[in-house]
Amino acid sequence: MARDLNRLLEPRSVAVVGASPKAGSVGGTILDNLRACGFSGSLHPVNPKYEEVLGVPCVPAISDLPPEVDLAILAINRNIVLRAVEECGKKGIANLVIITAGFKESGEEGAKLEEELRTLIDRYGLNVVGPNCMGIINSSERMRLNASFSRWFPPGGEIAFVSQSGSLGETLLECFEDAGLGVSRFVNLGNRAGLTENDFLAHLAGDDACRAVFLYLESFADPCEFRRLVTSIGKPVVVLKAGRTVAGAAAVASHTGSLASPDAIVDAFLHQSGVLRVSTIEETLTALRALERGVLPAGDRVAILTNAGGAGIIAADACVQSGLEVPPLSDRLRDGLAAFLPPEAGLGNPVDMIATASSEHYERGLELLLEEADAAIVIFRPPLVFHEPVEAVGAGIARVAEAQPGKPVLVCTLSHAATVEPLVAKLREAEVPTYAMPETAVAALSILRRARELRHPDRSEAAAEASDRAAAAAVLDRVRREGRTGLFFDEGAEVLAAYGIPVCPYAYLSNIDEGAAFLANVGSPLALKIDAPDLAHRFEWDAVITGIGTETELGDAFNRLQGVMNSLNLDGPRLLIQKMIAGRELIFGLEQDPTFGPAVMFGVGGTLVEALKDVSFGVAPISERQAERMLRSIRAFPLLEAFRGQPAVAIPPLVRIVVALGRMGLDFPEIAEIDLNPVIADEHGAVAVDLLIRLSEE
């Protein structure tokens, strides 16, 4: 159930505990910000040293505050924070912003204080932002609140900004102001002892005045809840994620673990959640400026209108490289443009109206192009001689954009000069995004396209294929009882079979005659390998021989591997014989990420997988649609399609393996890693040929 944060973000009365008239004091700065921003409610400084602070009457203690206080801001010494929180709880002040630092970020003693703070928060049912935070800001139409010590108070708009970092948060607020972005809600989470990003996502989901949410995060308070909230919020969520997950302490034996870049898993998690991820501050500004108007393209057809032919070509090239379409214009549109443009104009796409194009040309041209396009990029660089104000061009573009509310219009000025400022200002009034360079405008349109694709994230559950969890559990319990963390091949095959993942024909050999019988039964070629739970990467130990076609070759391989087996100090090794299968070599894997849980990997398999690193990841649960997206996202996916007389690999069996591994990881968190390399796939299906399954040490 979502917390009620209305009186936190829209308080009627605010107390500043620790307010001081001293120059540069945090409490005094916050009180001054509250007065300067135009907060219309009542203010109550709390400090026993003063009768008034900045001309506002002061009370000596929290207990002396009037009963109607909705929000208390604590900017006091760390040693008295807990007492102040308890006093607020007893007073019935449910909403707190704790500016004070010195908690878990400062070491063991601070961490203990923060645990005590959490206890008080739970005891009194408080909504707490912080500690160690900058504060909160609300500059929406309904509220003027600067309950922070930020130097920047955003002008208002429909974007909400939640930041884990205070310093970077203030930096971004400054950038947003310079860019003219409409940000009206800012929350610095600090240490998240109370409220987290998930609480604010839940609140903002029901805020009709919020069009998009931007989060700067270094970690996730509760990834599962974050994923649930984002998939249901119904508005774009943009995340700038910094930092890396903590690598597991256990040694990693599989390719999966060694290839599992924490950031790749973060990326998969955010994509599956329906988040638009950005990587830099510049990309953040590009994305939010594009999303400010809240218009997403229905398709990928882009029309380009310009008075500078070269810039139009650059924009067209960038569109094609980004996967957007720049289709030729219909004869009807070309005739319509020719009716008012000069003969020298280029009537393709881009439409080059040449330097003499007027504001009327821009308006009429854009109207026509949007009849057949899903979005438009308009390029206008003021020529040396222009006989009307540049803002007239902006006004015409804005009128068309307003008349076509379902089609994004992005404008490129080819300049940062003062001459284009009136144009930019006019477009900002209409929330039409403007950029200096055509590549940036195209990047913004690509972001809108990604936002469209993520707007309705896949909410389907992982396919409920028949699985025998009990059978798999019996195998894993037996392994645990024997004091092992690694599985033999036959044990792994049982676990995989319980989840519908097939393995190739195999047998264990105690003598050569058994091998001859296997050869006669399944045919050649065969592979003979040493199987032991503590043996990984057999090729590195000369523990596998492939291409065995005759009984003589089988006997030689048997004797040779007996010698290798005797030379290695292995736990209960056995000789494993398998039928070699032709097809494409793939790799599938599973690892338990310490933050996100089961992460499934897919890629082209074999011995070069670690060198190529052409893999993709998904975080369980993984639906069939998400699994197929994983498969198709690797660079080498064309190798799975038909080429050089080879039929295409069947995709559904590969999808089922991904889904099954994710479900297995959720069912058995004790499985630390699985490595299926290679899995041989063809037009009929896929079977695991080699496997490694390792349980956690606990």
Image (cartoon, helix red, strand yellow):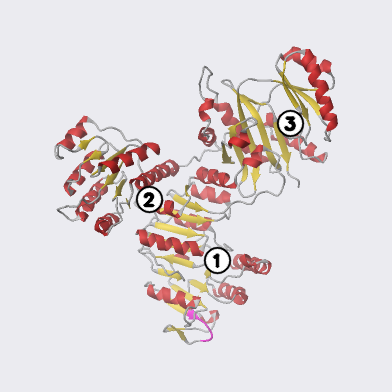
In the visual, does 567 lie left or right of 222?
A: right
* Residue 546 coordinates in the image, percent (x, y): 71, 22
The type of residue carrying mark 3 is Arg
For label 3, the SS is helix
**What stretch of residues is rendered in magenta?**
45-49
Q: Which mark is residue 130?
A: 1
Q: Circle 3 sits on which residue?
A: 538
344 or 400: nearer the viewer: 344
Q: Main secondary structure of the magenta part?
A: loop
Quarter occupied by residue 343? top left
Nearest to N terminus: mark 2 or mark 3: 2
The type of residue carrying mark 1 is Gly
260 or 665: nearer the viewer: 260
In the visual, does 131 lie left or right of 695?
A: left
For label 2, the SS is helix
531 or 101: nearer the viewer: 531
* Residue 591 coordinates in the image, percent (x, y): 65, 41
Please name which of the two marks, 2 or 3, marks the residue nearer to the observer. 3
